[in-house]
Image (spheres, rainbow, N blue to C red):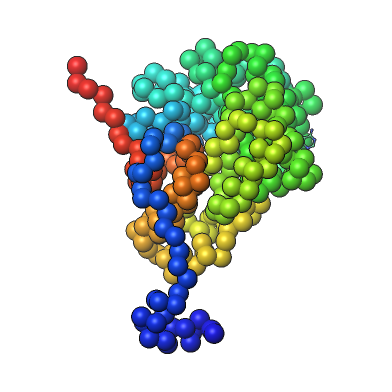
Amino acid sequence: MTHQSARHRPTLERWLTGKRVEGLPAPLSHPEPPLLSFEFFPPKTEALETQLWVCIRRLEPLQPRFVSVTYGAGGSTRARTHATVARIVQETALIPAAHLTCVGASRAEVDEVARQYWQAGIRHIVALRGDPPADSGVYEPHPDGYHYAEDLVAGLRRVAEFEISVAAYPETHPQALSPDADLDNLKRKLDAGATRAITNFFFNTSVFLRFLDRCLAAGISAPIVPGIMPVTNPAGLRRMAAMSGIDVPDWLGRMFEGTDQDLEIRRMVAAIVTAEQVRLLQANGVDEFHFYTLNRPELTYAIAHILGVRPVRSSPT
Ligand code: FAD
């Protein structure tokens, strides 16, 4: 029977013969709210700096266990990343994690950046290989540099007692030799001294859950924290996802069909899609989430709220 003819059956008959779907557990039925972390990017202009700080102040009462600040391709945001994490240390109660990459710098230079982070009070680094700047194509390690994130993790261990997070790819990193080789790489990064992996964003929740199974089978016991991207711009997302080998399911595109000119509707759709995703993960026992905030607080705040996280206001002195 085609979709069209099903629509022409009487309403009650359709409903009574339709597939029965078990509901997700009631929201907030989980004993503990999840642990959250939020990712920001360092601002390029004064206006973006203001936007970032509005975002930070809005999300701060949710008491994430850390907030991370990205490092631009090829180290292009080195000074801005440093300034942002240093200001977070000085002016907030948040714990910042600074991203650091291997691209375009010698080991001595990367070690020096890490030392400066340590001196500024930063104790957590997200250690990455990084990508070359968009116009320069294939990744070439610096001749005197760390080649892969695994080498950077080992190098950071020699610099100071940092807490270290690394990246993971439920749909396999696009340059990996194979899914198994990519998983071996993740294990090596953790064995070298990282304590958690944060995943690239994904939309097929079952792919993430299967990835957890594969990690466990490979002997990985560190947390694999899902990276959650509340999407409001599916066109931009498709470009980004294509570069990163992430599947954007047809249903997601259809959710946003015809909403190009209507940001409000896209935000509502994004909230619903993301809420379903995190609730499904939570129902599967996942209790740690990393949000790609894109320096905008509303969607992240709303999804955190749905997950059971409530603001904690500091008591007046
Ligand atoms: P690696 O773990 O080093 O792996 C890179 C590739 O090399 C993989 O395909 C791996 O399988 C392969 N590989 C590893 N070792 C070997 C080997 N010995 N021989 C052959 N192949 C090998 N980018 C930025 O520029 N700045 C950021 O701030 C940033 N933040 C990110 C945060 C998160 C949570 C994630 C998921 C990604 C982030 N990225 C960032 C993107 C990241 O830099 C790219 O995805 C990059 O291409 C890979 O980095 P990695 O640390 O995963 O690399």
Q: Quadrant of residue 11?
A: bottom left
Query: Is 194 on the left-hand or right-hand side of 227?
Result: right
Total labels: the figure holds 0
Q: Quadrant of residue 173?
A: top right
Q: Percent position (x, y) of residue 297? A: 37, 42
- The residue depicted at 36 percent of the width and 61 percent of the height is 265
Instruction: Please name whichever residue, 314 or 113, is drawn nearer the observer in this view of the structure.
Output: 314
Q: Is residue 225 visible?
A: yes
Considering only vertical position in the picture, is 22 above or below 38? below
Q: Percent position (x, y) of residue 187? A: 70, 32
Instruction: Please name whichever residue, 278 or 283, is drawn nearer the observer in this view of the structure.
Output: 283
Instruction: Please name whichever residue, 124 or 309, is drawn nearer the observer in this view of the structure.
Output: 309
Seen from this angle, which residue lies furthest left?
Answer: 316
Considering only vertical position in the picture, is 284 above or below 12? above
- The residue depicted at 70 percent of the width and 20 percent of the height is 154
Considering only vertical position in the picture, is 62 above or below 305? above
Query: Is 113 on the left-hand or right-hand side of 307?
Result: right
Q: Is residue 72 visible?
A: no
Q: Percent position (x, y) of residue 127? A: 62, 28
Report the quarter where the N terminus lies. Answer: bottom right
Q: Quadrant of residue 312?
A: top left
Query: Is 157 on the left-hand or right-hand side of 24?
Result: right
Q: Percent position (x, y) of residue 125? A: 56, 24
- The residue depicted at 42 percent of the width and 54 percent of the height is 24
Q: Which quadrant of the render holds ligand 1?
A: top right
Report the quarter where the C terminus lies. Answer: top left
Query: Is 76 on the left-hand or right-hand side of 28?
Result: right
- The residue depicted at 63 percent of the width and 48 percent of the height is 210
